Image (tube, rainbow, N blue to C red):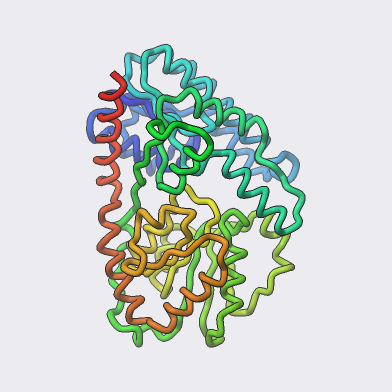
Amino acid sequence: MNVVVSAGGRFHAHHLAYQLALRKSLCKLFTFDYTAHDSSIPSSLVHIDRTSKLFNDYFVKLQLARFIAPAQFNVFKDNLFDRYVSKKLTSLDSFDLFVGWAHYAEKSLMIARRRGATIVIESGSCHIREQQRILHEEYQRWRLDYAPINSRTITKMCNEYEHADYIMTLSSFAQRSFIAHGIAGHKVLMVPCGVDVEYFLHNRPTEAASQPKFRVISVGLISLRKGVQYLLAAWNKLNLPKDCELILVGTMTKDFASIISRLNIPSNVTFTGPVDRSTLRMLYQQASLFVLPSLEDGFGMVIGEAMASGLSVICSTASAGPELITDGVHGLIYNAYNSKDLAEKIDWCYQHKNDLITMGKHGQQRIHAFSWDIYGNNIYQAYTKLLKDTI
């Protein structure tokens, strides 16, 4: 097997490429986000689009989002990367499989098709039209002027879906969204991605009394799409002691910032902003419970990070929660949007702290089944099967 991986951003593409390289199956990784930390992949197997990287770095450094809509810039940047890859593909030796990340591969997949490769579009989220629907409805609930996903983005991604042989998703939630939007079931595959289990492993106390403060943590973009508004609504329904804390970790997006004045945010809620990995690991270790309230999440890697830290988790159905945990064993699952149900589950966790610790220990054992090496085995087997089925 000889595989080309093409992804402008990081996503889990570098982990995929590394796992393929270990199995002597990586032809090339095309990317513009590659650093010295990624040196585990042999440099001879990596093509870096430095032009796209330069544009991306300057857009961030100069804070050009003040003048140019990020969605508009991303269309330009991702198309630039797509053209770069399409040109490079013509000079490669033969390859069996082209794995392109959604929104980065419309032109390059057509070149890969001419080279006789089987085409897989990797989607880290739901079908783009399902994302649009969810965002549109949520913006309407908050009476915001809806800034739709760029129409060229939707057109491009739908073209990629159509022309791919397969679409790879990371959760049954995402997989169902593609089928619901008319894509044949046999074409939509699902392999959950991995988690940095060893990095986040933490031995927690076995008794709740050793952790006197009840601290809930949620990690990810502070945005309407991530459902933070429903977590805050749930928190306000609770009658917990004032020394209990809710810690929200991540960058706040403009849509959330525009509604924050309408939310009743008590003094025991803290917004940390973005943090580095070592700080994140420390925050997981200091927490009692992890919550992911997403309205649309193709996977939710932070669920696995929290589980590796020994935390019990509450996550919405709109994520890979049902793949990662068994409800009531490793954590709790609730229906997205339902702040009443979420509040009841947080309250149950507060009232049953020793059970919470037990669930966290079960989850920590469970998450070892989602290491990157196991992901590598699973994705290699999936590629082997689809190539056999394509012949």
Pick the front one: 322 or 40: 322
Q: Is residue 295 above or below residue 33?
A: below
Q: Position of residue 363 (x, y in %)?
A: 31, 65
Decide if residue 6 is in sight here: no
Residue at figure coordinates x 48%, y 69% from the top left: 217
Q: In which quarter of the image is the N terminus?
A: top left
Q: Quadrant of residue 61?
A: top right
Asked whether, in this view, residue 65 is left or right of residue 108, the answer is: right
So how many labels did they put on this image? 0
Q: In this view, does 118 lie above or below 301?
A: above
Q: Position of residue 140 (x, y in %)?
A: 72, 53
Q: Position of residue 377 (x, y in %)?
A: 24, 40
Residue at figure coordinates x 52%, y 70% from the top left: 341
Residue at figure coordinates x 26%, y 56% from the top left: 368
Pick the front one: 181 or 273: 181
Pick the front one: 55 or 201: 201
Q: In this view, does 197 lie above or below 356?
A: above
